[in-house]
Image (cartoon, rainbow, N blue to C red):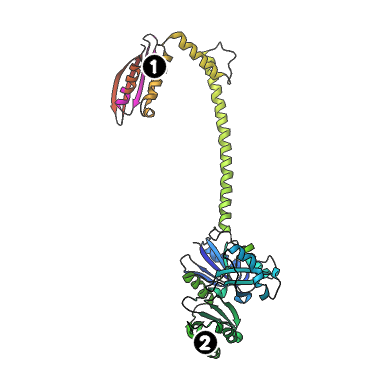
Amino acid sequence: MPNKLFIRALSLPQSDGDMLTHFEWALYARAGQKLSGGLAETFQNVVQILDQNAIDDVQIVGLVPANWVHSTRVTIPGKQTRFIQQALPFAVEDQLAEDLDNVHIALGDKNSDGSHSVDIINHHLFETFHTALLETGYPVNALYSDASLLPVTGINVTLAFENDWVLISSDNGAVSRVKLFNAASYFESVFKETEVAENPIQKVNCYISPNQLDSLKLLLAELQQIEGFEWTIHDLNIPILDLLCESWFQQGTKGINLCQGEFKIASGSEPSLKKWRAVAAVAGIWFLLQVGLDLGKGFYYQKEAQINQQQALQLYKSIFPGERRVTVNNLKRSLQGKLKQATSDTGSNDFLSLLSETGYQYSLVPNSQSIEFNSINFSDQRQELTIELKASSFQQLDQLKNGLTSAGLGAKISSAINEQNSVRGRLSVTGS
């Protein structure tokens, strides 16, 4: 799994096409350890840290402030996601303060009561942030509202206080980010209705920085007066973004991935674009070098072949000086004709006949490629072919001799000397 780079938007680029600016970020290793983080004005500040630490296998998890997102629940008949997606715009239309064409709608999981959680965000706003993340050159893994990453396992509601804001998330899918002055009224209006007879006491966790605790005493007292809730206060000694990231690694998120529809991620495990660009550049250079090398080899071997052809032609003419019509193109055919004529004229005891049969029997010897021929001599007077060779064993020499005798030729091993890992011998071959 790639390293995760969490980027939490604090503001948007001033105009379309601008680079990502003014954001909070945190880089986490595959196993969930924090590597670095902080505030940044431009993404170049983050790139420098990534490059300095040779970190290139990175996926981005984007976070948008939850107050940018309208979180709701709708009930749509049917089980197939495709049909639910088609009916979704009509199901939420009455809850919108703007035209359907101006919003991006993301569908969440089905809840225990049969309803679906839904997040709605301004289309242009979301597209601007999404595009800015893509322009970083790193793949985008997912985008969530920030409050949806708050830990809610085993409890009903979580609140995290951050300066003038409070992030709120619940186990029923309600997610928001509201101003402190509106926190008590929002909490009572949204969560008082969720009280049920089977569980009359709802558990609430509050994460508060020790530096902010004194200023929140009045608000906490007001919240704790709301009946039906059990409150637990936790000291928040880390940035709130770290709380969200660690919760993401430990329990995942019940939030909705906003990358749906036209913004759907093709594959969350693809290597980074930056990495692929480097691979493509190296592959291109290698291809050009290989093509150049192959062309160079082709020209060299073609020149060598022409030289060898001319040498063979000159040797042929020196042996058969009377030949006038032989050329490089018909040299092989002319030589084959001469050999065939010589074989038919001299019978089965001539040099070519004995050599041909010896070569055939050599090809039948097991592991024949280990046999080395040092010299081949032919006595026209004795009609005898003498071969000096080196074999890996005496058995190979004997197999070659037996093969020649079985073919009707006279063959004997004149001498055999054992050497280290080989046998050097002399084989005499005569006609039948």
x then y, percent, for residue 54: 51, 61
- Is 207 or 135 nearer to us in this picture? 207
| Badge 1 element | strand
- Is 44 or 24 nearer to us in this picture? 24
Residue with the mark numbered 2: 213
- Residue 377, numbered circle: 1
Mark 1 to mark 2 CA distance (whole Å): 108 Å
Q: Quadrant of residue 17?
A: bottom right
Residue drawn at x 59%, y 79% as measured from the top left: 177
x then y, percent, for residue 359: 40, 21
The range drawn in magenta is: 378-398
| Badge 2 element | helix
Q: Does residue 158 appear in this view? A: yes
Task: Give, as a three-letter code, the residue at label 1.
Answer: Asn
Residue drawn at x 35%, y 28% as measured from the top left: 366
x then y, percent, for residue 411: 33, 16
